[in-house]
Image (cartoon, rainbow, N blue to C red):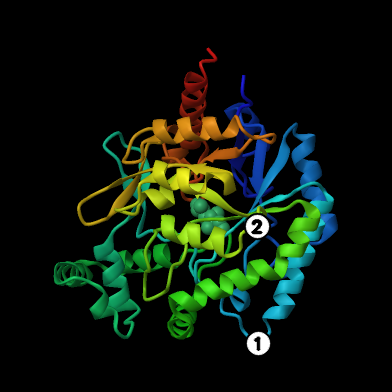
Amino acid sequence: MSIKLEQTWRWYGPADTVSLQDIKQAGATGVVTALHHVPHGEVWPLEDIIERKKVIEDAGLVWSVVESVTVHEAIKTRRPDAQRYIDNYRQTLKNLASQGITTICYNFMPVLDWTRTELFLEMSDGSKALYFNWNDLAAFDLFVLEREGAADDYPEAIKAEAKRRFDGYTPAELEKLKINILMGIPGEKNIELEDLRQSIGIYKAIGFDGLRKNLIWFLSSIADVCEENGIHMTIHPDDPPYPILGLPRIASNKDDLLYITKELDKPFNGICFCTGSLGAGVSNDIPAIFDAVKDRVYFAHLRNVKKDEQGNFYEADHLGGDVNMYAVMKALVAENATREVPIPFRPDHGHQMLDDLAKTTAPGYSAIGRLRGLAELRGLELGIMGEY
Ligand code: DNO
């Protein structure tokens, strides 16, 4: 019988309202976490890594994956001072590897990480989901950010609806929209509007090709450390998988992922296969993308999305939505059977539901919705493996 996928769970560290015991009760064995207290770009101190690892192990779990060692903007934009950040990144990788932590997730999205326009969209069953709507993004882009050239990026129908919404929103609603779009990693600080404006200008000059080059340069600059220490880097796809706010996106579809893995054709250069991020792309065929890059997949985020004709999407139940999770799981199980080390996956996001509706948790990362997701995904995996 083939080995099973490793069941993991994202934990935001000791400040997370979801505890390590909760994670154990959910049935995960591995933890996905990061040292969120270390400022982006600085070296992760060895002592802090050792301490975090001990906390996880004392709870009877293992630290399976780091998500993320954030790539500093100086590297993404290849600023003159980028080398300092490359050196720091290399040292962080060495420190992590010295403790046996060798699967690293990162992203190369300019400025913003994942982007949503609504964090609490009410589903018909009363649970709440994350939501992305182009009309709201355009309302922010055109009338709050007032980005130069933004009007050229949207079809007339979206522009008209964006104006209607902008005019109709109360100041509080507009503020909420702004906060949602500028939200960074949960627990970390939001991006300032002015910083975003400046960055947009910088990335305009870099463009799609320039950003790709910068990514390959970054990976080449850490390749020796990764190879010497058995590290697998896994790039997280863009979320949503489109250029937004005039910022280029380079990890949005099959061609992008193939380019990244072929341009630097080394096993350490891998992918975090996020079915939710890729699934939001209207032309993305998720099982086909997996098939194209599967030998480089070292981590998986399993999540589902439901899109409408305009490309707006909400995060659906893990086994609902547009992503054929059965096909994805079947392919993962088959790939896992060829591996010596099981592929870690985590139930990505989940609806805020039941008792969690009364709690404050990181958006997408409440316990019960993910517990439901993990339970369903685990059942799907066992069903496919025929192990009842
Ligand atoms: C959102 C996450 C992302 C992801 C990073 C990886 O919930 O999927 O924040 O962790 O993009 O670098």
Which residue is situated farthest in the top direction here?
388
State which tag comes first along the sequence, 2 or 1.
1
Q: Nearer the viewer, residue 38 or 156?
A: 156
At a point 18% along the width and 70% down the height, the residue shown is 155
* Mark 2 burial class by Cα count in 10 Å: few <14, some 14-19, many 20+: few
> Can you give x and y, in whole percent of width and height, for residue 169 in the image?
23, 67
Q: Which residue is mark 1?
A: 80
Q: Amino acid at mark 1?
A: Pro
At a point 30% along the width and 51% down the height, the residue shown is 313
Which of label 2 and label 1 is nearer to you?
2
As drawn, 62 above or below 42: above
Q: Quadrant of the N terminus?
A: top right
Determine if the C-beta at disc 1 is less than 8 A from ligand 1: no
> Can you give x and y, in whole percent of width and height, for residue 170 in the image?
25, 67
Q: How much space separates mark 2 and mark 1, taking CA atoms?
A: 27 Å
At a point 35% along the width and 60% down the height, the residue shown is 117
> Can you give x and y, in whole percent of width and height, for residue 78 in the image?
60, 80
Q: Which residue is mark 2?
A: 266
